[in-house]
């Protein structure tokens, strides 16, 4: 299974479209919020199931604030992260995820990609395809793949 994880597209789909053209055989797209009303376009372009949540800039949207669902053997919590102080680090969100019995928490908001496997919870942030803030400021996303044994592997990729 191959999953594309993106965030913070801020109503600009040009780089999202480039990623969809670049990455083959996607089984699911996960968007960590701040689509700014473009969630229907994002879903239509994906041509596969989409999980998406509300971001701090998604005004007047009816998207859920957060979701919990299963990917293979993993319990996943999807949230934008701004309510869990992720701009200060991911300690609070990982602690909350652990209290909820979550295996993987996926969040956005910081516009900086992260794969944090420390502790009992894996924390994933794909960064931003539109307004990256990490050193080098390259648009980023994450590919999650489940191998034959069902183990999750994550790769930060750049445009």
Image (tube, rainbow, N blue to C red):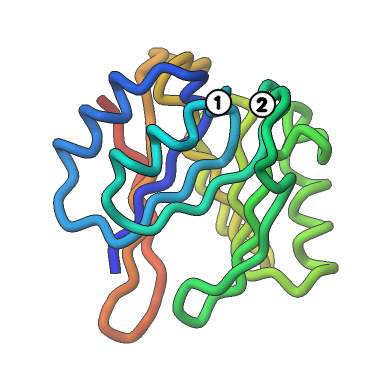
Q: Would you call the spot at circle 1 few (<14 residues within 10 Å), some (14-19), or many (20 or more)? A: some
The answer to whether residue 43 is above or below residue 34 is: below
Q: Which mark is residue 92?
A: none
Q: Residue at x 32, y 64 (%)?
A: 145
Dot 2: what SS?
loop
- The percent coordinates of residue 67 (x first, y second) are 67, 58
Marks 1,2: beta carbons within 8 A: yes
Q: Is residue 94 left or right of residue 37?
A: right
Relative side of 93 to 34, left or right = right
Task: Please state the horizontal and vertical placement of residue 3, each as a whole percent of the image.
Answer: 35, 57
Q: Position of residue 143 (x, y in %)?
A: 33, 50
Q: Which residue is mark 2?
A: 58
SS at circle 1 = loop
* Position of 31 relative to 154 (above/below): above
- Total count of labels: 2
Image quadrant for the C terminus? top left
With 88 as the anchor, is 115 left or right in this view?
left
Residue 12: quadrant of the picture: top left
* Residue at screen point 63% across, 70% down: 103
Find residue 32 and report its image quarter: top right
Residue 84 visible in rendering: yes
Q: Give the residue at mark 1.
A: 37
N-terminal-most mark, 1 or 2: 1
| Residue closest to the eye, 42 or 55 | 42
Q: Is residue 145 above or below residue 154?
A: below
Q: Quadrant of the N terminus?
A: bottom left
Give the left or right position of residue 68, taking residue 113 as reference. right
Q: Which residue lies at the image location 76% right of the left edge and 32% below the top edge?
A: 82
Residue drawn at point x = 15 percent, y = 36 percent: 21
Image coordinates for residue 134, horizontal then vertical, percent: 50, 19
């Amino acid at each position: 299974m191959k999953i594309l994880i993106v965030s913070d597209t801020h109503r600009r789909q040009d780089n999202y479209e480039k990623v969809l053209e670049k990455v083959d055989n996607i089984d699911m797209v996960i968007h960590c919020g701040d689509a700014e009303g473009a969630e229907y376009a994002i879903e239509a372009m994906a041509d596969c199931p989409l999980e998406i949540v509300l971001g701090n800039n998604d005004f007047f949207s009816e998207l859920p604030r957060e979701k919990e669902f299963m990917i293979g053997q993993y319990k996943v919590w999807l949230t934008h992260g701004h309510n869990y102080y992720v701009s200060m680090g991911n300690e609070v969100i990982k602690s909350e995820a652990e209290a909820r019995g979550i295996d993987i928490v996926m969040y956005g908001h910081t516009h900086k990609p992260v794969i944090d496997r420390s502790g009992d919870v894996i924390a994933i942030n794909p960064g931003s395809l539109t307004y990256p803030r990490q050193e080098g400021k390259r648009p980023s996303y994450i590919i999650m793949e489940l191998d034959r044994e069902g183990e999750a592997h994550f790769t930060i990729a750049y445009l």
